Image (cartoon, rainbow, N blue to C red):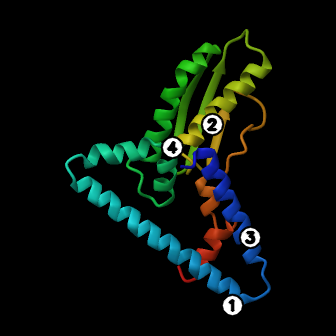
Amino acid sequence: MPDSKDFQQRIQRIGELVQQLEGAGDPALRGTAKELVKLLMDLHGGCLERMMEISFQSGEGARLIDDFGRDSLVSSLLILYGLHPDDLTTRVSRAVEHIRPQLRKHDAEVEVLGIEGESVRLRIAVGAHACGSTAASVRTMVEQAVYEAAPDVSSLNIEGAEGKAASGFVSVAALLNTSANPAAALASESGD
């Protein structure tokens, strides 16, 4: 069973392979590859949706679907197909609440300033006696928590902790953006 990091690596590899196909000189081959990706995505999405329906109809369905949504690997897949039981705001808020105890150990706090669409604005306040590396560590902890819970965040703006984003995370939104994601470009150009 792959973990979240393995899942992310596989997604990145899929993107690389699709880019190679996109660079192929044969337009018929590109069209075939795009259609294949789209059909596989449609098939998997339909099957997952039906599995969620069957789970919900069973006696323990609602609890089971919530458990799916809390599992880091399954959650990412549900987000990819638009089937996650929790909306973006709920997932980001839950991540912020989950990380608060760790931040307090570093004399830091985090506040959600706003969530609009897939854009999230947070503010980090680090204690006056904290060094610059503490602020960077806190920022990284917050980024990782938010991206793990909500990989569909397209923009994460963190105020109060200066420095460049430390994570190498690739969001679902970036993967689905046709200009940034060859897989989505392949799927969209095959007739969707």
- Label 1, label 3: how many angstroms apart (C-alpha)? 16 Å
Q: Nearer the viewer, residue 78 or 115?
A: 78
Disc 3: CA contacts within 10 A as few (<14), some (14-19) or many (>=20): some
Mark 1 or 3 closer to N-term? 3
| Vertical comparison of 152 with 120: above or below | below
| Vertical comparison of 65 with 80: above or below | above
The disc label shown at residue 19, or none: 3
Mark 4 or 3 closer to N-term? 3
Residue 169 horizontal/vertical position (percent)? 68, 46
The disc label shown at residue 28, or none: 1
Mark 2 or 4 closer to N-term? 4
Label pair 4/1, CB-CB below 8 angstroms:
no
- The residue pinned by badge 2 equals 144
Amino acid type of disc 1?
A: Ala
- The residue pinned by badge 4 equals 72
- Label 1, label 2: how many angstroms apart (C-alpha)? 40 Å
Disc 2: CA contacts within 10 A as few (<14), some (14-19) or many (>=20): some
Residue 67 horizontal/vertical position (percent)? 37, 42
Amino acid type of disc 3?
A: Gln
Residue 184 shown left or right of residue 83 in the figure: right
Amino acid type of disc 4?
A: Ser
Mark 1 or 2 closer to N-term? 1
Residue at coordinates 73% horizontally, 76% vertically from top-left?
21
